[in-house]
Amino acid sequence: MEISVYIATSLDGFIARKDGSLDWLPGSDGSDDGSGEDYGYGEFMAGIDVLIMGRNTFEMVRSFGTWPYGELRVAVLSSTLGSLPEELPDNVVRMSGLPRDIREMLAADGCRHAYLDGGKAIQAFLDAGLVNRLILTRVPVLLGEGIPLFGPLAGDLKLQHIKTLSFENGFVQSHYHCL
Amino acid sequence: MEISVYIATSLDGFIARKDGSLDWLPGSDGSDDGSGEDYGYGEFMAGIDVLIMGRNTFEMVRSFGTWPYGELRVAVLSSTLGSLPEELPDNVVRMSGLPRDIREMLAADGCRHAYLDGGKAIQAFLDAGLVNRLILTRVPVLLGEGIPLFGPLAGDLKLQHIKTLSFENGFVQSHYHCL
């Protein structure tokens, strides 16, 4: 099973303000930014058969109201969360364990390509050497503080640059393979 | 006077390891990386008439042995450093003060375009709203820890993306104007 990260950060590397706010990220509230551009999200999601997300990301997505992932299988990582709310689709499940265990369980269940979301989850999988692809979109703003995308690692992690795309609104999206 | 930053960081935003080491940055030891590519450094430097650097960057440059900036005017920012070593060219001077004072003194002295180097100095000038251009080269490696390029800010700082260049070795260089 391949694991990919697709995420936007400020130029100083934050995925959200300290309070989780995404007001600095155009389009994060679901509004159309008028560009007709989806920054490759649709194409990326078309190849995904499971979304792995951390607890904080789950709570944030829940706060938006409508569950946005339809029939896509979703694994919510949490060791403390009880049962999931009943109104969620049956394909949303709670999982806990080490990144390699999560990966093995999903692969054994037939998953081929996972989308990994959420700062702490991404950091844990990167540190375990379990992220295969990183698609990073840089928003042209410095926030000064917030929730960082990257965190401590056991050692250097080298990447292979695949391509970089620039968009009219100033977004710069780089695609990497983890080596 | 325009102030520009031209700097390389790891993908997780570090300009050096905690001990100042640049071993992760190809070519930082002055060796030729064989690409024949200077990543725009020569063209950038051709338009610069003063280099402003922080104390730590000064010490690091000194540790390389030969002073690499020839006749270029250099302002070393430090409030604690005594006189500069005598073997340095006369065009290397020590300055102290707030970023806006430094900027005014150099502009009054006829400087038109400054190259600002060093983590703390860059953070101080960014926070004072005194950086005009940011040329940021991302090296495809995650270090996990180190000396960060960016730091706290009084508020959001919006940037205008000008262009992004990708190089064969995986470097991705983005040019921004600060708004």
Image (spheres, coloured by chain):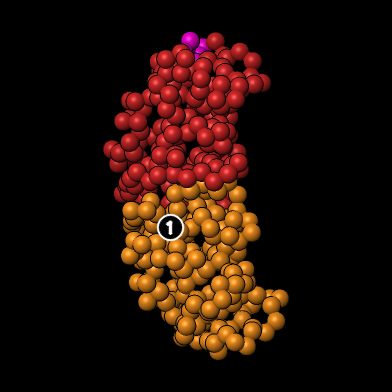
Chain colours: A orange, B red
Q: Overall secondary structure of the magenta stretch?
A: loop
Residue A179 visible to an observer of this rendering: no
Quadrant of image for the C terminus of chain A: bottom left
* Residue furthest to the left: B36
User: Looking at the image, is B94 positioned above or below residue A109?
Assistant: above
Q: Is residue A52 above or below residue B17?
A: below
The span shown in magenta is B87-92
Q: Nearer the viewer, residue A41 or A121?
A: A41
Image point (35%, 72%), residue name: A43
Mark 1 crowd level (few <14, some 14–19, many ≥20, 10 Å Cα): many
Question: Residue B53 at x, y = what percent?
Answer: 52, 26
Q: Is residue B28 left or right of residue B153?
A: left
Q: Amino acid at mark 1?
A: Thr
Q: For residue B19, what is the image quadrant?
A: top right
> Which residue corresponds to the image point at 53% horizontal and 58% vertical from the top-left?
A23
Give the image location of residue A123, x and y in percent: 57, 62
Residue B145, position in %: x, y? 59, 49
Residue B177 vertical position relative to residue A74 in the rendered view, above or below? above
Marked residue chain, label 1: A
Q: Nearer the viewer, residue A5 or A28?
A: A28
Residue A174 placement: quadrant = bottom left
Mark 1 lies on residue: A137
Give residue A27's quadrant in the image: bottom left
Q: B125 or B29: nearer the eye?
A: B125
Seen at 48% across and 64% down, the residue is: A28
Q: Position of residue B98 (x, y in %)?
A: 60, 25
- Secondary structure beneath dot 1 equals strand
The answer to if B103 sits in the magenta stretch is: no
Is residue B4 among the parts visible in the rendering?
yes
The tally of labels here is 1
